[in-house]
Image (cartoon, helix red, strand yellow):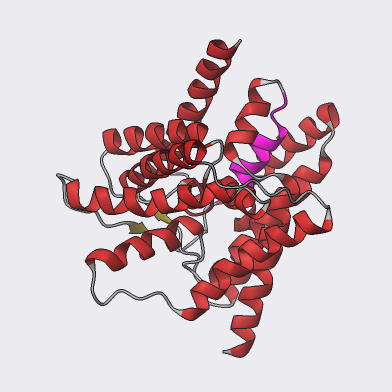
């Protein structure tokens, strides 16, 4: 038990450190994609696939990855993804991007997190359709997984040859392996799941978040903060009502969008998209579409 907790905390710290070092934010990656630099975008969206490299080891150890496919209607998945993407641009950061900026000193991002909780609660009380169950897919056995991983690896190697940034490729592979390993010690570690369960405490009296999960979440933040202090890039940004209001609104919209998809972009990249089903691909495609269209409109309006 002690070993399991220690490993979970170490892995969470390393994930936070690497996420901060590489700037693992889908909004930032999409901005670079529009500028003709797709390496970060490909590396980020595919890092969940590289977590599958450890699948044979998990099968040998009789450990199952908590992969799933959202059991929601396609229109709901699409609209939820688009809403989440647009809100992420308004927030200037996705799920992980919000945490990395908060750990860098932007305390206004705290209101994004508050908004997540409020948005999830709002969706729970206002939704018209009943909550759908997820379809668990714990086994990775089909050869097409390995074929796709090989293709993605070749694409990344090609992009490194053109644009450089080989550290992004290695970091994405390492991040995929670390996040996959953390699931074996703490299956509910992702920020979007953490905030969903915090929200769930409002309407479910017996809902409680263990001290272990709280420790893992704060160790993730500690890894992000440690990197900013190590590189001396911590910059305190004090609370301002106007910025806080925007982040609060963005967080509410992100929380609603994540609820419609049964997971924020972190869960979509790491747990949903790697199942490679049609329903599993729609949320991530919709999120990136919402981000790209919003960034394009933002650039046109300011340019």
Residue 81: image quadrant is: top left
Residue 11, horizontal then vertical, whole percent: 66, 69
**Residue 124 in sight:** yes
Residue 56, horizontal then vertical, whole percent: 61, 66
Residue 245 as seen in the image, left or right of residue 123: right
- Decide which of 77, 88 is in the foreground and name it: 88
Residue 175 as seen in the image, left or right of residue 63: right
Residue 153, horizontal then vertical, whole percent: 72, 42
| 40 drawn magenta | yes
Quarter of the figure that contains the N terminus: bottom right
Give the residue drawn at x 41%, y 39%: 283
Give the residue drawn at x 76%, y 54%: 228
Give the residue drawn at x 55%, y 72%: 184
Give the residue drawn at x 23%, y 53%: 124
Residue lying furthest left: 128
Residue 164 as seen in the image, left or right of residue 62: right
Quarter of the figure that contains the C terminus: top right
- Decide which of 149, 260 is in the foreground and name it: 260
Residue 129, horizontal then vertical, whole percent: 16, 46
In the image, which residues are magenta?
37-47
Whether residue 249 is situated above or below residue 232 in the rendered picture: above
- Decide which of 204, 251 is in the foreground and name it: 251
């Amino acid at each position: 038990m002690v070993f399991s907790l220690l490993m979970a905390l170490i892995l969470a710290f390393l994930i936070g450190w690497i996420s901060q070092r590489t700037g693992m934010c889908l909004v930032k990656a999409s901005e670079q994609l529009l500028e003709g630099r797709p390496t970060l975008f490909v590396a980020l969206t595919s890092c969940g696939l590289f977590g599958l490299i450890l699948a044979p080891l998990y099968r040998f150890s009789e450990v199952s990855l908590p992969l799933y496919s959202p059991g929601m209607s396609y229109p709901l998945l699409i609209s939820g993804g688009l809403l989440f993407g647009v809100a992420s641009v308004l927030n200037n950061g996705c799920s992980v991007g919000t945490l990395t900026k908060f750990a860098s000193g932007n305390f206004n991002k705290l209101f994004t997190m508050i908004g997540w909780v409020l948005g999830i609660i709002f969706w729970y009380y206002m939704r018209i359709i009943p909550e759908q169950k997820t379809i668990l897919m714990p086994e990775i056995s089909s050869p097409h997984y390995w074929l796709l991983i090989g293709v993605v690896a070749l694409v990344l190697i090609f992009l490194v040859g053109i644009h450089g940034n080989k550290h992004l490729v290695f970091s994405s592979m390492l991040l995929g392996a670390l996040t996959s390993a953390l699931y074996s010690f703490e299956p509910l570690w992702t920020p979007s799941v953490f905030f969903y369960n915090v929200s769930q405490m409002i309407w479910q009296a017996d809902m409680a978040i263990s001290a272990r999960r709280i420790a893992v979440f704060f160790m993730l933040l500690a890894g992000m903060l440690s990197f900013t202090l190590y590189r001396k890039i911590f910059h305190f940004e004090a609370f301002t009502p106007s910025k806080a209001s925007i982040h609060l609104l963005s967080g509410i919209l992100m929380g609603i969008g994540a609820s419609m998809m049964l997971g924020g972009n972190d869960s979509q990249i790491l747990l949903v998209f790697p199942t490679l089903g049609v329903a599993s691909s729609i949320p991530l495609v919709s999120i990136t579409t919402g981000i790209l269209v919003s960034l394009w409109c933002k650039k046109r309006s300011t340019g």
